[in-house]
Amino acid sequence: MNPVFTIFRKEVAGFFDSLVGYVFLGVFLIATGMFVWVFEYNVLETRVAELDILFFIGPYLFIFMVPAITMRAFSEEIGQGTIEFLVTKPVTDWQIILGKYLASVFLVLVTILPTFIYVISLYALGDPPGNLDLGATFGAYMGLFFLGSIFAGIGLFTSALVNNQFVAWVLGAFVCFFFFLGFGLLASLPNLDVASGDDLTAVGFTTFFTKLGIMEHYTSISRGVIDTRDALYFFSLVAFSLASTHYLLTRRR
């Protein structure tokens, strides 16, 4: 059997064998459901057939919840000493990483899929029925999935850094928050675009930090338009996270 699939199946089974997995799914669905249907500016109150509130609150929930999926991926094995046993098996570091990463991405997908009931509900409740921009909605779903995939890569990296699950979760949530909002906050600093050195060359730090953050690219994809630059950004960030995780595992070997 392919080692990647074996690790993938083990990670997914471990997630659903514990109560934590079901609590995770329940919390996400209840939280998004409350924002979509109950809290102020819900779709019933605004009478607008759109799920913008879901795609606005989803990333903030993912900042805390995706690192909770990945926190035990490596930190638990490092803490228990089983990582040394794993890396001595006839399996490469990349197979270990890909197996755990694909399992994390699969769990992100499983988390998102039940929210399609909101799409079906709005499609049926529209006036007239079907008055819902499906293209933009599915584009926004793709953006949310890409976002969860990036957070999964970051979570694996922070999990491989430490031997404590709680520390891995806190560190992962912080790094996810920084990449999602931190660069945007830096870009909003006053007097950032100033002349440098001899005051002859303008430095566009605002644009640089804005493009470096996830928020800019997530917002772009959420409009329903898949730009190759946005897709390249997401894939590059995932590749960088996994390569960094590989470096940590190589050092352990």
Image: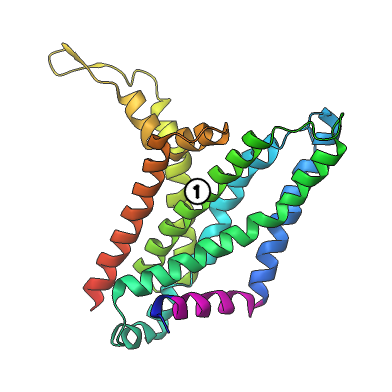
Task: Residue 209: name its quadrant.
Answer: top left
In this rendering, is residue 190 above or below 88? above
Picture residue at 37% right of the left edge, 42% below the top: 232
* Residue in the image at 71% along x and 59% along y: 27
Image position, residue 168 (x, y; %) = 44, 65
Answer left or right for 84 relative to 14.
Answer: left
Magenta-colored span: 5-18
Horizontal side of 84 relative to 223 (left or right) equals left
Task: Name the outermost residue toward the left.
Answer: 198
Q: Is residue 13 magenta?
A: yes
Q: Nearer the viewer, residue 140 or 199?
A: 140
Please say which color scheme the image uses.
Answer: rainbow
Tell me which residue sits at (42%, 73%) in the image: 75
* Residue 184 location (% of width, % of height): 44, 32
Asked whether 49 falls inside the magenta stretch, the response is: no
Q: What residue sits right under mark 1 in the picture?
A: 146
Query: Could you tell me the amino acid type at mark 1?
Result: Phe
Residue 253 picture location, percent across and down: 23, 79
